[in-house]
């Protein structure tokens, strides 16, 4: 069996990387950018860091910022209409996963209008054309949406999130500039950072993992473990630290891996929590990560022992099982150090059956290395009840 690996064409990394945006647009002859960003980033001037550069270069642009933290079908459909009305010929998306996921869906539908209902994009959609040319500028160090072939949309009528997987949606250019992430408050730094760690650990233990993806995930675990505490401290104090740049790279490297081999039960359950309780995605992932690792330990103990070493744990003299337990303990400690809650407010016993059903139907679940019964997933959810 052949292992496919898909990466974006061009990426720029490091402080000041946003200065490459105008040149990338002009070299290709595009005339007007459709800027897709969320309202808070617009309000606090983060989006303007990019649009000011467009103005300086004489590149016209139109703004679309009607995006919710968990973007909905309507957000996407309104965005498609706004793109068509704007006369733009390319997209610049600025933000976290919400902005980038919305932009991906807009770009796909503009070029593949037969999917205008949005819901038909769920799973692996048979789109024929690549999305509208897109430059993605992340402002959080977590989702890696700028380098993945995945995006997630919320269907509020059915109280569910659905995952779309499409090689045609990957942004053409990624601009990974840690300066664009400097406005993240401490809580968001922690949540998105733990989301990135979840990507790396789930990607390292998923069914589809192989040598090429392992290379990315192992390094990502190292980078995130080494830098998240510093990035969190920087966000709390406002004092410059070394963590931000390491996190920007770590989350991107994790995205290069998991986008190609999938995730597992943690993300399946996290999507379900976010849909039902509007729990921030990174927080949901972090709460569930040690629980999912413990559940999967019987079949991936060796890999979890390697995770421990990647996280800087000295496993000398430990058995494989002891090292795997050390990895779980290290994740719990990191999560606690960046003040992630261990339980989910509002989660009640009456909802567990539906949550388990939805999680088992999520597109991320099949990648899990261990099969789970409905009853086992109910019990996993029960572990994060307050």
Image (cartoon, rainbow, N blue to C red):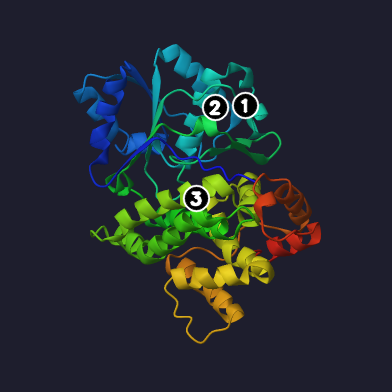
Q: How many labels, in total?
A: 3
The C terminus, quarter of image = bottom right
Q: Nearer the viewer, residue 163 or 74?
A: 163
Say whether residue 280 is visible: no
Earlier residue among tags 2 and 3: 2
Q: Secondary structure at mark 1?
A: loop
Q: Residue furthest front?
A: 1
Q: Nearer the viewer, residue 358 or 206?
A: 206
Q: Secondary structure at mark 2?
A: helix
In the rendered image, which residue does mark 2 sit on? 76
Tell me the tag on residue 290.
none
Q: Does residue 363 appear in the picture of this structure? A: yes
Give neighbour class at mark 1: few <14, some 14-19, many 20+ (Cα, 10 Å). Answer: many
Residue 244 lies in quadrant: bottom left
Residues under labels 1 and 2: Cα distance? 8 Å
- To which quarter of the image does residue 345 belong? bottom right
Q: In the image, is 279 to the left or to the right of 233?
A: right
For residue 118, which numbered disc appears in the image?
1
Residue 239 x, y percent position in the rendering: 23, 60
Do the residues under discs 1 and 3 have CB atoms within 8 angstroms?
no
Find residue 257 and name its label. 3
Q: Could you tell me if the residues under marks 2 and 3 are in contact, i.e. CB atoms within 8 Å? A: no
Nearer to us: label 1 or label 3: 3
Nearer the N terminus, badge 1 or badge 3? 1
Residue 296 or residue 81, whichever sits in front: 296
Q: Residue at x 58, y 77 (%)?
A: 325
Disc 1 + disc 2, Cβ < 8 Å: yes
Tell me the SS state at disc 3.
helix
């Amino acid at each position: 069996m052949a292992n496919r690996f898909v990466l974006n064409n061009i990426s720029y990394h490091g402080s000041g990387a946003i200065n490459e945006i105008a040149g990338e647009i002009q070299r290709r002859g595009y005339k007007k950018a459709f800027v897709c960003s969320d309202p808070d980033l617009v309000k606090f001037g983060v989006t303007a860091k990019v649009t000011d550069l467009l103005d300086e270069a004489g590149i016209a642009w139109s703004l679309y910022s009607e995006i919710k933290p968990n973007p909905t079908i309507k957000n996407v459909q309104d965005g498609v209409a706004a793109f068509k009305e704007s006369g733009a010929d390319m997209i610049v998306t600025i933000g976290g996963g919400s902005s980038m996921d919305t932009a991906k869906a807009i770009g796909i539908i503009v070029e593949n209008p037969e999917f205008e209902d949005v819901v038909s994009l769920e799973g692996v959609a048979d789109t024929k054309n690549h999305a509208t040319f897109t430059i993605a500028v992340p402002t959080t160090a977590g989702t890696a949406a700028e380098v993945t072939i995945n995006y997630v949309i919320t269907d509020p009528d059915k109280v569910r999130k659905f995952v779309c997987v499409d090689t045609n949606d990957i942004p053409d250019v990624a601009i990974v500039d840690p300066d664009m992430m400097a406005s993240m408050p401490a809580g968001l730094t922690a949540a998105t950072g733990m989301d990135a760690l979840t990507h790396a650990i789930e990607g390292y233990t998923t069914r589809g993992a192989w040598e090429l993806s392992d290379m990315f995930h192992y390094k990502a675990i190292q980078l995130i473990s080494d830098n998240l505490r510093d990035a969190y401290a920087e966000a709390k104090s406002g004092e410059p630290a070394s963590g931000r740049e390491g996190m920007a790279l770590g989350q991107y490297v994790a995205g290069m891996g998991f986008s190609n081999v999938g995730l597992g039960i943690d993300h399946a359950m996290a999507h379900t929590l976010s849909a039902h309780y509007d729990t921030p995605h990174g927080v949901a992932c972090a709460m569930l990560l040690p629980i999912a690792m413990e559940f999967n330990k019987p079949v991936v103990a060796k890999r979890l022992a390697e995770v421990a070493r990647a996280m800087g744990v000295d496993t000398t003299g430990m058995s494989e099982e002891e090292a795997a337990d050390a990895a779980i303990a290290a994740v719990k400690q990191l999560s606690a150090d960046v003040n992630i809650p261990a339980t989910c407010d509002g989660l009640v016993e009456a909802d567990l059956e539906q949550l388990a059903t939805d999680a088992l139907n999520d597109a991320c679940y099949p990648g899990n290395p261990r099969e789970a019964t409905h009853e086992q997933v109910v019990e996993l959810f029960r572990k994060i009840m307050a």
